[in-house]
Image (cartoon, helix red, strand yellow):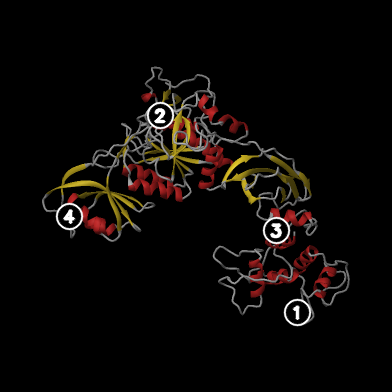
């Protein structure tokens, strides 16, 4: 666990500056400061004050600079600058061929259970901001990284890149993602992609600048989780802003609570950055699930994890237990934090579309309660662990063409269900226990979470459903059209082409649009003569076209034709569906490209009101674009569901 103490780094250099601000003497004291800008970094201002050894963190709108001390007030007074702070210093707290061990700590967080279900953190990107990672360790696979080390003068110093020259970062990395091979140990999420972000030096020390550089890198490289097994005694506003920015960018930030706790457990001893609300603060427990006496405690503790005598990977150069086999024991909340990171990686793999905030809620709600009932200052919500199922009994699914259905247990008062399909949220806050879903050929996995107090608490086991029909060559179960096409197929509204395709990417013809809409609303499709000169009795859909004309849904052209082969625009689709479903109401807002004088304007607004379509993200409807069959299936299914 890494401890931070405050050190103001000063250097004495000769200042020679051609700019408008000058120091009062030739030998001027310079200091390392961090400048936070209200907007983009103002390079002109930095030049004016003679800034040297500049490190810009564009994602954070922060610059780390050496500047004459007497010009710091100039920076503070500038209207583009929100804050100037001094630099702080942070501290960290031949290979074995022995058979691989599965440790008590991994079992405690249910990592073996996740592995048995196929969850190993695959596809999840984790930034370990620490002393680096041993790239040569046979039990670790480092996906990449960067080094932001600094020497005593604030100059970037990375002679060996992100290679670990202290040992702490490699130990953290092994807890998270030691490989599932035949030797050593196995991590909580062995297939997660770990990135070595070296912000701490060979003494386990780093500065605000080096830590910010690491967080900035994590944001730029779209990490999913950041591990911060480091602490500080004092608030650091720049670091606070950085972790907030990471969290607001969807990155989960996990930090050690600290090792400054008292054996009595008295007082609030959680350190920074774990104290910040955007950070998940982790305390530590031993193998008996008792609080480690040195573990920091307080209201900011969110969860706890194993942190006593944890066996993990280290570089040979840092293996001080006498065996020099690349593994050793460490104790501290620095070890507890990566267990939580590993659990989050398992949940992220299982629920890839959940937001960081949603995954955080899941972590809290599935923690095993320790100590006093509910959240407490020693264990937070409890022991972090991966949970696949809890106390909700699991129903079986009934399957028919294009449809899977199951009934969930009755809910307690005030509760609801969140329904997941293949790990992705399907429906939220559902109180109806009869669940229906639609799709094309494929095997679907459903889970339901009981939501109480805004958190997902109890889960069903996986409910499996194998839909065998409909089967279209050009529609896969994950396609955006699949659910709507399954729905329409279930109700015999569509059937596709004789060659086995649905034709999702083909442009829709007028005859096809009318036939599908007419079938959906139950019109008579008996083949017969029509009022249109180009639609004889023998034509495709003649009965449906005539029925639609009799109902006033379509009227054809002035020359008496229907032009059945003409392609349909999105505007014409809106008119057809608004008339077919006799839509009454319309939204008061509109799309940027739909004027009130447009013939289809009211129909488009009706579709928007009933949420049959929401248009495009740029608030356009694109009324004159031709529509493909797949999109029409979505709109038609949405319209059909209005009355069901």
**Residue 231 is drawn in which quadrant?**
top left
Residue positioned most to the top: 322
Which one is earlier in the sequence, the residue at label 3 or at label 2?
Answer: 2
Q: Is residue 644 above or below residue 122?
A: below
Q: Is residue 185 above or below residue 247?
A: above
Q: Is residue 635 above or below residue 182?
A: below
Residue 259 visible, this angle = yes
Q: Are marks 4 and 1 in contact (CB under 8 Å)?
A: no
> CA–CA distance between discs 4 and 2?
48 Å
Which one is earlier in the sequence, the residue at label 1 or at label 2?
Answer: 2
For image coordinates 63% across by 71% down, the residue present is 623
The reply, left or right, for residue 31 in relation to residue 137 is left
Q: Foreground residue, 19 or 38?
A: 38
The reply, left or right, for residue 540 in relation to residue 190 is right
> CA–CA distance between discs 4 and 3?
67 Å
Tell me the crowding category of disc 4: few under 14, some 14 to 19, or many 20 or more residues within 10 angstroms, Cα based: some
Is disc 2 placed on a helix, strand or loop? Answer: loop
Residue 318 drawn at (x, y percent): 37, 25
> CA–CA distance between discs 1 and 2?
79 Å
Q: Which mark is residue 17?
A: 4
> CA–CA distance between discs 3 and 2?
57 Å
Q: Which residue is mark 1?
A: 557
Residue 275 drawn at (x, y percent): 39, 41
Q: Which mark is residue 332?
A: 2
For image coordinates 53% across by 20% down, the residue present is 99
Q: Which residue is mark 3?
A: 504
The reply, left or right, for residue 549 in relation to residue 266 is right
Residue 109 drawn at (x, y percent): 53, 31
> CA–CA distance between discs 1 and 3?
27 Å
Residue 56 drawn at (x, y percent): 32, 51
Which one is earlier in the sequence, the residue at label 1 or at label 3?
Answer: 3
Is disc 4 placed on a helix, strand or loop? Answer: loop
């Amino acid at each position: 666990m890494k401890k931070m103490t405050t050190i103001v780094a000063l250097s004495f250099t000769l200042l020679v500056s051609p700019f408008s601000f000058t120091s009062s003497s030739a030998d001027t004291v310079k200091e390392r400061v961090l400048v936070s800008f209200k907007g983009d970094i103002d390079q002109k201002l930095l030049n004016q004050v003679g800034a040297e050894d500049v490190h810009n963190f564009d994602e954070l709108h922060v610059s780390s600079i050496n500047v004459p001390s007497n010009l710091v007030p100039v920076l503070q007074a500038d209207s583009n600058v929100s804050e100037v702070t001094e630099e702080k210093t942070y501290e960290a707290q031949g290979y074995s061929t022995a058979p691989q061990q599965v440790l008590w700590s991994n079992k405690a967080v249910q990592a073996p259970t996740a592995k048995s279900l196929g969850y190993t953190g695959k596809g999840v990107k984790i930034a370990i901001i620490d002393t680096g990672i041993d790239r040569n360790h046979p039990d670790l696979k480092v996906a990449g990284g960067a080094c932001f080390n600094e020497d005593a003068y604030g100059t970037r110093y990375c002679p060996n890149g992100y290679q670990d020259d202290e040992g702490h970062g490699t130990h953290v990395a092994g807890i998270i993602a030691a490989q599932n091979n035949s030797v050593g140990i196995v991590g909580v999420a062995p297939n997660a992609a770990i990135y070595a972000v070296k912000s701490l030096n060979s003494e386990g020390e780093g500065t605000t600048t080096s830590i910010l550089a690491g967080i900035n890198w994590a944001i730029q490289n779209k990490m999913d989780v950041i591990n911060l097994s480091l602490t500080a005694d004092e608030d650091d506003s720049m670091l606070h802003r950085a972790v907030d920015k990471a969290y607001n960018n969807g990155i989960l930030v996990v930090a050690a609570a600290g090792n400054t706790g008292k054996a009595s457990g008295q007082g609030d001893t959680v350190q920074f950055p774990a104290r910040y609300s955007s950070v998940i603060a982790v305390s530590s427990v031993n193998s008996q699930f008792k609080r480690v006496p040195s573990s920091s405690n307080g209201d900011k503790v969110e969860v706890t994890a194993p942190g006593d005598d944890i066996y993990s990977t280290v570089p040979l150069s840092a293996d001080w237990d006498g065996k020099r086999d690349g593994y050793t024991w460490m104790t501290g909340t620095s070890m507890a934090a990566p267990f939580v990171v590993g659990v989050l990686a398992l949940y992220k793999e299982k629920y890839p579309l959940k937001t960081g905030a949603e995954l955080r809620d899941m972590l809290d709600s599935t923690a095993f309660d320790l100590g006093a009932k509910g959240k407490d200052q020693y264990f937070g919500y409890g022991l972090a662990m991966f949970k696949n199922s809890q106390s909700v009994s699991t129903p079986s699914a009934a399957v028919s063409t294009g449809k899977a259905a199951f009934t969930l247990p009755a809910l307690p008062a005030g509760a609801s269900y969140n329904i997941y399909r293949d790990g992705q949220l399907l429906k939220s806050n559902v109180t109806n226990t009869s669940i229906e879903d639609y799709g094309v050929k494929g095997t679907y996995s459903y889970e339901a979470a009981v939501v109480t107090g805004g958190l997902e608490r109890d889960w069903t086991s996986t409910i499996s459903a194998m839909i065998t029909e409909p089967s279209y060559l050009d529609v896969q179960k994950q396609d955006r059209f699949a659910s709507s096409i399954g729905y329409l197929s279930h109700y015999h509204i569509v059937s596709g082409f004789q060659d086995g395709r649905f034709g999702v990417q083909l442009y829709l013809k007028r005859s096809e649009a009318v036939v599908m809409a007419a079938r959906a609303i139950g019109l008579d499709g008996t083949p017969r003569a029509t009022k249109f000169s180009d639609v004889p009795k023998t034509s495709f859909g003649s009965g449906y076209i005539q029925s639609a004309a009799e109902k006033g849904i379509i009227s054809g052209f002035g020359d008496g034709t229907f032009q059945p082969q003409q392609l349909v625009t999105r505007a014409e689709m809106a008119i057809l569906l608004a008339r077919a479903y006799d839509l009454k109401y319309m939204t008061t807002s509109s799309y940027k490209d739909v004027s009130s004088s447009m013939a289809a304007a009211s129909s488009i607004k009706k579709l928007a009101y009933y949420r049959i379509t929401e248009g495009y993200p740029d608030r356009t409807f694109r009324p004159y674009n031709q529509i493909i069959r797949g999109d029409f299936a979505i709109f038609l299914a949405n319209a059909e569901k209005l009355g069901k």
